[in-house]
Image (cartoon, rainbow, N blue to C red):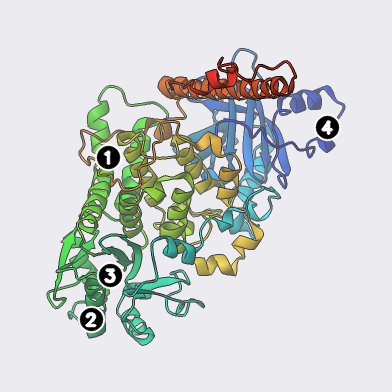
């Protein structure tokens, strides 16, 4: 994040203040760092920040067990960095003891949040050894036997964010269980599927032994289960992984029968199976034992959505970073952006979700899967649910959606993000969740009054996707979170969000309960999310505040102020009236209206 956390105060630095002028200058520079409860100072040092926009900037760097904080000491240029260590992907030494050239010796830091940082140090006396070792150790705690910061922080909030999502309550909100769907606890010990949640909704007619037989034929035992049901037409979105067809074209009658139970639950003529993959990838997966549903699945149709895999998405975002950081590629901007294919991938994900939502809205049940059902599947189900169900477009409802479709259903956050892990080149890393949030942002742009939350919430979620300050996005699945006691020992991100909800609310929000949103998924209507991908460019950052939104907030504040004054006037007038009524000289037959009566018809035009 680009600003210090000012809401917390800590005296942890005071113990280190020395009386020497040099130390007092250093502490003066670092005095505005408000440490979080549990955050501890590790090292501070004189350093030169090789700023892409201001050149070489002298200053001080402070490294804690949570962040890297830099502040310039130059009077003519003010530069400040506040980077959670969790956002660091890679730390490398730059130059050697014999390197020539000014500022050629130091540290090169690659971040997960679209920026790189370079720091230069003096060459004599191995001046970078201590800072490199300490930074490397605390940026990648799991690789060094240290706990993630989420287990160290002692932050306290009024609301416990872990209570935001309760599976049975959410199913009840959707009208379940009913005579077609039942809730099962077959996975309560993660015996059926170790990457699924403990509470599942399955067809009413299915038996527990059916579920076990189906699990044997689905990749990672991720059987088709209900994600969402349409209250009126009873069509459902079910999610799962690919069937284990293999090269020999294996069949499983239990799996075929089970999918037919999903179809029968609302008398859908044909069950639509959306396979997120390009068809060539699905065919290729047969070689590794996977595959797709063939003609043996009667009363079902298969649709491939052509969304590329995690490796393609990773490379696409890398290309995007190359053209936006440190400098925006101005000369051939449109062709450069097109060559990254990022917006094309966003378009395909949105387009797939629109097809799912449209099919369900028209009364047909669908099954969605990719290979393992935890990347593209999560994108498609959650976006379709966002389009279909206005509850998920509220601030709390959106938290439930993320907890349900991403966290509880085992999107591999630890593998995709690499929390606390030094293996930056790990092939499992991929920005799948970032891409989902980008799709949500595209929808908020096309429907500015349909979402209760604003862009600031989306930015906060992505910042803490990496920060390791909260337990929300840690580990790959619920079974791993239970094992590491995440809910007991860490704080939820939603505790922070719900403690200051006002800053995440969209002033233009207009609730519309039955409305289905169909965004336009064409390249002409999609935009690059500048305030996320290019926010580290100071020229961009100055333009972030929307003047319309700012003015609207001012008008709302003004309205509230007038309503308060009106209330005070009504109270004072009612007390005056009661005194007059009790007065012996009061004229009870008077027809003159009281000030209270005059005020009550006032309306505010905002």
Q: Nearer the viewer, residue 484 or 353?
A: 353
- Give coordinates of residue 542: x percent, y percent: 47, 20
The Cα atoms of the two marked residues, 3 and 2, are separated by 16 Å
Q: Nearer the viewer, residue 78 or 475?
A: 475
- Give coordinates of residue 343: x percent, y percent: 27, 40
Residue under pointer 1: 343
Residue under pointer 2: 257
Q: Single out the residue that lies furthest toward the right.
A: 19
Residue under pointer 4: 17
Residue under pointer 3: 242
Of callouts 1 and 4, the N-terminal one = 4
The Cα atoms of the two marked residues, 1 and 2, are separated by 39 Å
CB contact under 8 Å: marks 3 and 1: no
CB contact under 8 Å: marks 3 and 4: no
The Cα atoms of the two marked residues, 4 and 2, are separated by 72 Å
Left-right relation of 304 to 408: left
The Cα atoms of the two marked residues, 3 and 4, are separated by 60 Å
The Cα atoms of the two marked residues, 3 and 1, are separated by 27 Å
Of callouts 3 and 4, the N-terminal one = 4
**Image quadrant containing the N terminus:** top right
Q: Single out the residue that lies furthest toward the left.
A: 295
**Image quadrant containing the C terminus:** top left
Classify mark 4: residues with Cα within 10 Å, few (<14), some (14-19) or many (20+). few
Residue 344: name its quadrant.
Answer: top left
| Residue 478 drawn above or below residue 80 | below
Residue at (29, 64) in percent of width and height = 236
Of callouts 3 and 1, the N-terminal one = 3
């Amino acid at each position: 994040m680009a600003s210090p956390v000012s809401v917390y105060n800590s005296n942890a630095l005071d113990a280190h203040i020395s009386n020497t002028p040099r130390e007092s200058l250093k502490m003066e520079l670092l005095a505005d760092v408000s440490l979080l409860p549990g955050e501890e100072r590790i090292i501070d040092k004189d350093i030169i920040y090789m700023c892409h926009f201001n050149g070489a900037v002298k200053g001080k760097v402070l490294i804690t067990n949570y962040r890297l904080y830099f502040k310039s000491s130059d009077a003519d240029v003010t530069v400040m960095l506040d980077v959670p260590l969790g956002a660091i992907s890679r730390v490398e030494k730059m130059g050697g003891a014999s390197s020539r050239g000014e500022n050629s010796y130091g540290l090169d830091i690659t971040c997960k949040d679209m920026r790189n940082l370079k720091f230069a140090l003096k060459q004599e006396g191995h001046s970078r050894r201590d800072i490199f070792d300490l930074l490397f150790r605390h940026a990648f705690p799991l690789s060094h036997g240290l706990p993630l910061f989420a287990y160290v922080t002692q932050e306290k909030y009024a609301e416990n964010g872990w209570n935001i999502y309760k599976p049975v309550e959410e199913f009840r909100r959707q009208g379940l269980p009913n005579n077609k769907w039942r809730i099962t606890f077959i996975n309560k010990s993660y015996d059926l599927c170790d990457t699924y949640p403990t509470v599942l909704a399955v067809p009413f007619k299915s038996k527990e032994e059916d579920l076990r037989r189906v699990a044997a034929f689905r990749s990672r035992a991720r059987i088709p289960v209900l994600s969402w049901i349409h209250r009126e037409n009873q069509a459902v979105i079910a999610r799962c992984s690919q069937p284990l067809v293999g090269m020999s074209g294996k069949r499983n009658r239990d799996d075929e029968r089970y999918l037919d139970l999903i179809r029968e639950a609302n008398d859908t003529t044909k069950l639509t199976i959306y396979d997120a993959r390009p068809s060539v990838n699905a065919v290729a997966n047969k070689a590794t034992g996977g595959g797709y549903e063939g003609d043996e699945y009667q009363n079902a149709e298969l649709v491939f959505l052509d969304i590329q895999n995690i490796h393609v998405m990773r490379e696409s975002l890398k290309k995007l970073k190359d053209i936006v950081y440190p400098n925006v590629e101005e000369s051939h901007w449109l062709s450069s952006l097109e060559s990254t294919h990022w917006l094309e991938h966003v378009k395909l994900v949105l387009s797939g979700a629109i097809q799912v939502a449209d099919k369900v809205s028209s009364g047909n049940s669908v099954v969605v899967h990719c290979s393992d059902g935890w990347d593209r599947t999560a994108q498609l189900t959650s976006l379709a649910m966002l389009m279909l169900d206005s509850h998920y477009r509220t601030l709390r409802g959106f938290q439930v959606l993320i907890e349900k479709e991403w966290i509880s259903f085992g999107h591999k956050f630890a593998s995709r993000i690499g929390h606390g892990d030094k293996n930056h080149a790990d092939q499992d890393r991929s920005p799948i969740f970032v891409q989902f949030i980008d799709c949500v942002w595209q929808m908020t742009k096309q429907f500015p009054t349909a979402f209760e939350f604003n862009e600031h919430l989306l930015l906060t979620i992505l910042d803490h996707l990496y920060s390791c300050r909260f337990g929300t996005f840690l580990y790959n699945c619920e079974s791993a979170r239970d094992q590491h006691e995440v809910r007991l020992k860490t704080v939820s991100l939603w505790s922070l969000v719900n403690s200051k909800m006002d800053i995440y609310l969209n002033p233009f929000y207009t609730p519309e309960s039955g409305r289905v949103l169909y965004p336009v998924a064409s390249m002409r209507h999609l935009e690059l999310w500048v305030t996320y991908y290019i926010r580290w460019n100071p020229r961009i950052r100055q333009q972030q505040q929307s003047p319309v939104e700012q003015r609207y907030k001012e008008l709302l504040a003004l309205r509230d102020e007038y309503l308060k004054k009106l209330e005070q006037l009504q109270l004072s007038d009612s007390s005056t009236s009661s005194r007059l009524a009790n007065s012996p000289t009061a004229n009870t037959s008077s027809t003159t209206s009281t000030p209270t009566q005059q005020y009550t018809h006032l309306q505010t035009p905002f």
